[in-house]
Image (cartoon, rainbow, N blue to C red):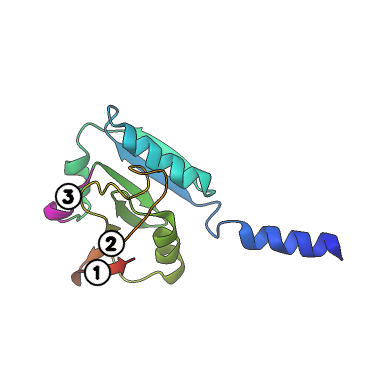
Amino acid sequence: MKKRMLAALMLIATPAMAAETVTVYRDPSCGCCELWADHMADRGYDVKIVDDTDVAERAMAAGVPEEGLSCHHAEVGGYQVHGHVPEEIIARLLDQRPSVTGIVLPGMPENSPGMAREKYGTLKVYSYGPGGIEVYSNE
């Protein structure tokens, strides 16, 4: 009985997207991008880093609004994820599967994963796609 309970608890504690691959495009000279990739890997994602000296061009080609640009761009589960978006918001995106192209956390907020050891305070994440731009998360 204890073994079953332990197995059940391990399943609950394991990230829902543990097998999900995150491809991160980042400038090779940017250290915070690698820290964000570590944030995702620490939460069970399979992270692939691709060096790209023109992340802004890649992001805008994927539909990221210019005012939303940050230092790295990622692809996960068919969505575009731009900037230092916390994993729990990405997990929600992958769970809810809204009809958007992706989500973006503009700039490089000092309280975001990759800039800080862990997210603290409030971060405003936007969704974007054919329906326009709107707030996806403000937490």
- Select label 2 or label 3 by which is in front: 2
* Spot occupied by residue 24 in the image (x, y as percentages of width and height): 36, 42
The earlier-in-sequence mark between 2 and 3 is 3
- Please provide the residue range marked out in magenta: 65-70
Q: Which residue is mark 3?
A: 60
Q: Residue furthest right?
A: 1
Alpha carbon separation for disc pair 2 and 3: 17 Å
Tell me which residue sits at (37%, 55%) in the image.
120
Q: Is residue 100 left or right of residue 19?
A: left
Which of marks 2 and 1 precedes in the sequence? Answer: 2
Pointer 2 with pointer 3, Cβ within 8 A: no
Whether residue 133 is situated above or below residue 21 in the rendered picture: below
Q: CA distance from mark 1 to mark 3?
A: 19 Å
Horizontal and vertical percent position of residue 82: 28, 51
Exactly how many numbered labels are in the figure? 3
Q: Is residue 78 magenta?
A: no
Q: Amino acid at mark 3?
A: Met
Mark number, residue 125: 2
Q: Residue at x 35, y 71 (%)?
A: 98
Marks 1 & 3, CB-CB < 8 Å contact: no
Q: Position of residue 137 (x, y in %)?
A: 31, 67
Q: Quadrant of residue 73?
A: top left
Mark drawn on residue 135: 1
The answer to the question of whether label 1 and label 2 lie on touching residues, with beta carbons closer than 8 A, is yes
Instruction: Tell me if mark 3 has few (under 14), some (14-19) or many (20+) residues whose alpha carbon lies within 10 angstroms of its own.
Output: some
Name which residue lies at 22% across and 46% down: 70
Residue 44 disc label? none
- Quick one: SS at disc 2? strand
Residue furthest out toward the left: 66
Q: Which amino acid, mark 2?
A: Val
